[in-house]
Every structure is written in structure tokens, then in C-alpha cells.
Amino acid sequence: MDTKDSKTSPTGSVHIVEEKGSVELAPKLYNADVDTSGVDERKLMRKIDMRLIPWLSLLYLLSFLDRTSIGNAKLYNLERDLKITDKQYLISLTVFFIAYAAFEVPSNIVLKQLRPSIWLSVLMLMWGLFMTLQGVAHDFGSLVAIRWMLGTFEAGFYPGVAYCLSCWYKRSELGIRLAIFNSATTLSGAFGGLLAAAISNMAGVRGKPAWAWIFILEGLATIIAAILSFWIIQDFPDTAKLLTEAERTVVIRRLQGDDQFSAAGEKIRLKNVLASFRDWKTWVNMVQLMGCDMPLYAFSLFTPSIINQTEGFKATAANLLTVPIYAFAAIVTCVVALYADKHGKRGYCNIVMLSIGGIGYIILIVSRNAALSYFAVFLATCGIFPVVPNTIAWIANNHEGAYKRGVALALGVSMGNLNGAVSSNVYRAKDQPWYRLGEALVLMYICIGIISNALFLYLCKKENARRDRGERDEVIGSDALEDNGNGRYATVEDAKQDKGDNWSGYRYIL
């Protein structure tokens, strides 16, 4: 930073020497009067992990189960009973994603204004209600209307939870937490198949078919979990009742030490909300999530159908065969996250895993052998399930500012889910049993993911190098100092709070 005489201590504190003496410009210490000597940081983080991760993962399992169970229900004569065509079925999938994408950004802004324990629980209660109502849909129109409402209320949950977790953990800790949380998608795939197979035995109970009971029972489970969530979901660190004041101080100080300057709270300003729209990173991030979310939904919605056709099994057997695939995906997801957290190589991990997934889809396209295709599905999971949480963590790692990060995450997830609408229409009944068109389009999206991840990695490295060379340094101190075009600030603290991740001392995670 440009000053008359500046020195940086090993801890990052900046000292400005002016004619009138030495001025300490280190960031203000949060709760300077609070004694934190009695807080064991490891025990505190374990406490936070246990109160946050298991319950939120369960809720996400229910969320993903609710949005994708229609794929399982289809195998139990959903189309025949509702007298809908394959094209109408695909439309009912598509409207969910359009509604989902439309409401994610406003939901994250509202979330920051309200308490997560209230907002997330209300969202869940409402989508549980509409999930249950799917079980009484009687025609194409009612199914489409219910799927739209389901997408509207589910929209804010995933980006909201991802944002909440990013407000609790350091950048090097977030990946594995998001991976465990996202593993709920893999477990929902495995559990969904088992559950659908079990519920199918209720066919005929009270005159309702098996597919209706799948929706009704899963919806009721969601409603019960939503009611409990009002008391179980934790709020942000600066307000959470989970923490004592000493523990709160430790959490916020460690986040601020990790360049999360807004950890102590940030007032809503239009400038902070619009910052994400003006940031080049946000737009690249949106393309990155396109490259992994469309394959994620295509895989989750149609894997039972693919196995059903290529293996020639009945519906229940096809659902059961998805279980080992999703179990494998959960293991790979956590292993990749641990490596990326430890080594800070999120971009490299994404590129490698997407490449493996691409090989899987190439095999699916050319294979005419059921066993080989089943093996290829395992490879395909490597390019989907580990990449989604790693990309979310990478986005959260590189956006500072409470509202900016929340909007950036919501925009990225919104674009990813909008492309879920594409996934709903690429596995057409007339393409069975091998679904070449669907698999080729998924492969195309994986290639988009590889290119966008490589671009983001390159641009972040380039920007870090510019900051290392001092090209982004701000002017700190007296008005007598010449403005260099990067901004003039009275203190380093002012520069951090105003510029967020654009501050010259901030380094992007690669």
C-alpha cells in the first residue's frame, strides 16, 4: 500500500509512520473486552459441527428427495394414472427449475435480514405441504401447478444453507462441511430408491397408487422436520443462541483473521447487493455451476430410468441398483473435499473430476453393453457429485462481504438450477433404451464445466499475481499522499470493509 513509510508485521498488521508519530492500523479487535482464554477452539468447532451439519444435511436430504422423487414415482405408473404424455411429464419437471431459479437471489437477501431459523423453516414447511399435495394431483394441470409451487419454496433452501455455512467456517474448513452437507444428495438418491421400493408395497391402500404414497409420506416427513427446525436451525454467529459471548468472540475473530471482514455483521446497502452483479467472478461462477448442476439433475432424475432400460430390470430392482452408485459418490465427494481443503486446490480438483466424469459419459454414449454402461455410471458420478460442493465452497471462498457473498452464491446456484430445466427434457422416452441425446448433452455441459473452471483458475491466479506485485495497493493515510487510482482510505480497516475481496491484501483461493 502506498504510504510515506509502511511496514507489515508477520501477523499482517500494517503500521503507518507519519510526521506526527507511529499509528497502528491493525483491524479492530472484535469484543476487545471479552476474555476468551477459557475457550477451547477445537471443542468449540466440534460443538458447532454437531449442531449445524447433521441436521442441515438431513433437511437437504429431504429437499433433494422431494424434488427428485418424481423420477422414482414415474416407474410406478404416474404417467398412466394421470393420463399425461412423456412430453407433459418433462414439462412438469421443467417448471420446477424455472421457479427454483427465479426466487433464489431474493430469498438469500431476505435470509440475511431475517433469522435463518425462521426463514429456512418457513420455506421447508411450505414445500413439504406442496410435496404432500403432489400425491393428490389428478391431471397434468394440477401436477404442473404443484411442481411450480414446490420449486418456489425450495428455491431459497440450498443457497441459504450454503451461505449460512460460509458464515461459520474459515475458507480452508468450508469444503468438507459442504461436501458432507451435499452428500445428502447422494444419500437421497440411494435412500430414495430404497424408500420408493418400500412404499410401493402400499399400492392400493385407501385407493391410492404407489406413486401417490411416495409423495404423501415424503411430504409429511418434510413437514415434521420443518416444525422441529424452528428450534434446531442455528442463526448467524453474531446472533446465534448456541454460543456464549466468549465463544461468539472466538468464532468471529477467527473468521476475521481469515479475511472475512464482515463476520461481525453488515448492514444492508444497495452497493453491497449490486457488488456481486459488477464482479467478473460472479459471471464465471454462474457458468461453472451450469457445468455441474445440469449433469447433477439429469443424473438424479433419470438414473432409475436408465438402469431400468439398459439392464432390463423391473422398477423396484432398478431403484435398488442406484444404491451402490450413490454410496460410491458420497465417499468420493468427501475424499475430494478433504484434499481440496487441505491443499487449497479447488480448481485443479474440479478439472480432474469433471474429466473423469466426461470419460464416464463417453462410455455411456458408445456402449451397447449393459454391464459396461453400469460401470460407466460410477465414473459419471465423479464428475458430478464432488464438483458441486467444491464449486460452492470455491465461490464462497472468493467473495467477501456478507451480502455480496450471499447474492453471488444465489446467482450461481440460480443459473445452475435454471439449467436443471434443460436436464428435464433431454432424456426422452423415444430415445430409450440408451438415451444417446441426453448423455451427449450432459457431456457437453461437463466440457463447459472444464473450460469455465480452467478460466476461473487462470483469472484468479493472474489477479493474485497483480496484488503480489503491488498493482492493486490502496493509498492509506494522509491526504497529502498522492492517489494512485486504487482508492484512498484513512485506515487499512476502512479499505477492507469498503473493498471486500477487492482489497489489495486479499488473496483468492485457487
Image: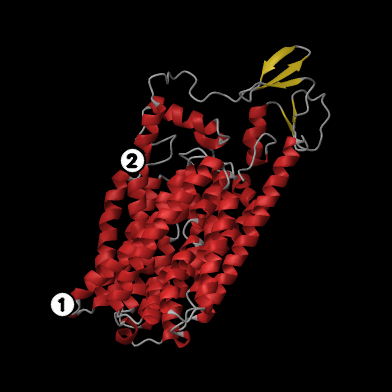
| Residue furthest out toward the top | 21
Task: Name the disc covering residue 443, or none.
Answer: none
User: Does the rendering let one see residue 110?
Assistant: no
Per the model, the C-alpha gap separating discs 1 and 2 is: 40 Å
User: Quick one: 378 or 63, which is closer to the camera?
Assistant: 378
* Placement of the N terminus among the 4 image quadrants: top right
Looking at marks 1 and 2 on the same chain, the residue that comes earlier in the sequence is marked by 2
Mark 1 near mark 2, Cβ–Cβ under 8 Å? no
The image quarter containing residue 83 is bottom left
Instruction: Depth check: give the residue in front, 331 or 195.
Output: 331
Nearest to viewer (mark 1 / mark 2): 2
The residue wearing badge 1 is 206
**Residue 395 pos. (x, y %):** 57, 50
Count of numbered circles on the image: 2
Q: Is residue 114 above or below residue 43?
A: below
- Against 259, residue 274 (above or below) is below
Residue 274 left/right relative to 303:
right
Task: Give the labeled residue for mark 2.
Answer: 50
Of the pair 218 and 509, the residue shown nearer to us: 509
Residue 207 in the image, given as x and y percentages of width and height: 17, 80
SS at badge 1: helix
Indicate whether 281 appears above or below 259.
Answer: below
Q: Residue at x 55, y 67 (%)?
A: 358
The quarter of the displayed image where residue 507 is located: top right
Residue 29 appearing in the image: yes
Q: Residue at x 62, y 46 (%)?
A: 510
At x 41% / y 78%, what residue is drawn?
A: 370
Q: Which residue corresponds to the image point at 79% horizontal and 25% vertical from the top-left?
A: 479
Q: Identify the secondary structure beneath mark 2.
A: helix
Q: Amino acid at mark 2?
A: Met
Amino acid type at mark 1: Arg
